Image: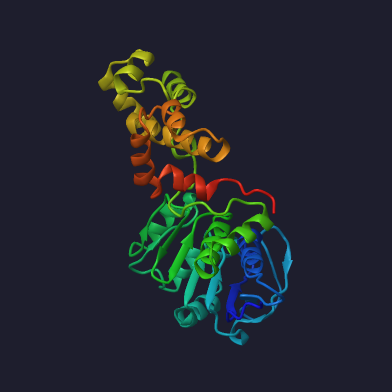
Amino acid sequence: MVDMTPRRNVLIVLFEEVLSLDVTGPLEVFTGGGSSVGDTKAYRVRTATVDGRPVRTSSGLLLTPDCALDEADAPHTLVVPGGDGTRAPDPRLVDWLRENAPRAERVVSVCTGAFLLAEAGLLDGRRATTHWALCTALAQRFPEIRVEPDPIYVRDGNIATSAGVTAGIDLALALVEEDLGRDQALAAARNLVVFLRRPGNQTQFSAQLAAQTARRAPLRDIQHWVVENPDADLSVDALAARSGMSPRHFARAFQNEVGMTPGRYVDRVRLEAARRLLEDTDDCVNKIARVCGYGTPESMRRAFVRSLGASPAEYRRRFQPLTPA
């Protein structure tokens, strides 16, 4: 039986110094996810530049587009990648996005592609994200955008923005699952040897990257000890005693040097430890909750729902590695 689902046109914008993986990641997902019964495809993926000429990526790879933007068919999904070329974008590209992006059913940006959407006024009044290192810059440059630095992708209406580089794959897989169902998304993920997809509100980076490293050795030692012992008593009083400081002095010094309270740091470390055990082991939730310091599975469930929008069981289901076909 042949799948008669109408093709969805996917148009990927190219420009000088685009990041190659921002382009090829979503392209491979839509191409692989679109494979259906027989020879039909659910997606027709095309690339285009402003003038139809080839461009070089930030790594020097030469990309030849299918056509010029003005010659492209109206897209169902418009993908705007990032890269060094977004720092001083071609005004013609920004003008084209301003005029044509609203006609697409979905608009997707990867990494710093969000800056191109912002330049075109498409993110005004919306929630959005980009690479974690540039979220502050996006918020300062475009104060009318509600920038969310933590999620790997954010959807607001028909516009979706994703975090750095590989997050574009996660977002594309989510869209394939939405369009064609879980089985097609699984097939695309299996072909690319990646997880089905990370939940969109999963944080972009680990607790250790999110936090600063303390200047003073006693506080650095505490940071490392917390990571190695998530099941220990990690109260402020206990950590202060371990560092040889009073609780009040410890809490103030930790906040100043690490950039977050001890409690917030502990929460992030425990959540990250639990996530990794859910991803990498078959241990039951009860055991993971215990070894990660949650005490009870319910405490761990609340932490996951609050931070990731999914229960531990749902997180494991979405993030567990796929078995070979």
In the visual, does 32 lie left or right of 225? right
Q: Residue 259, located in which quarter of the rendered image?
A: top left
Total labels: the figure holds: 0
**Residue 252 x/y as whole percent:** 29, 27
Q: Is residue 87 visible?
A: no
In this rendering, position of residue 60 left or right of residue 264? right
Q: In the image, is residue 68 above or below residue 147?
A: below
Counting from the top left corner in percent of width and height, residue 86 is at: 54, 65
Kindly give the residue lying farthest to the front in the view shown: 1
Q: Quadrant of the C terminus?
A: bottom right
Above/below status of 26 relative to 229: below
Is 111 in front, or is 282?
282
75 sits to left or right of 136: right
The answer to which image quadrant residue 298 occupies is: top left
Percent position (x, y) of residue 233? 36, 20
Where is residue 60 shown, x and y percent of the image?
72, 60
Q: Is residue 282 above or below residue 131?
A: above
Considering depth in this image, is 60 or 25 the residue closer to the camera?
Answer: 25
| Residue toward you, 187 or 110 | 187
| In this picture, residue 111 sits left or right of residue 53 | left
Q: Is residue 310 above or below residue 270?
A: below
The colour scheme applied to this rendered structure is rainbow
Residue at image location 43% in from the left, 55% down from the top: 137
Confirm whether residue 196 shows in the render.
yes
Quarter containing the N terminus: bottom right
Which residue appears at 50% of the width and 53% of the height?
Answer: 131
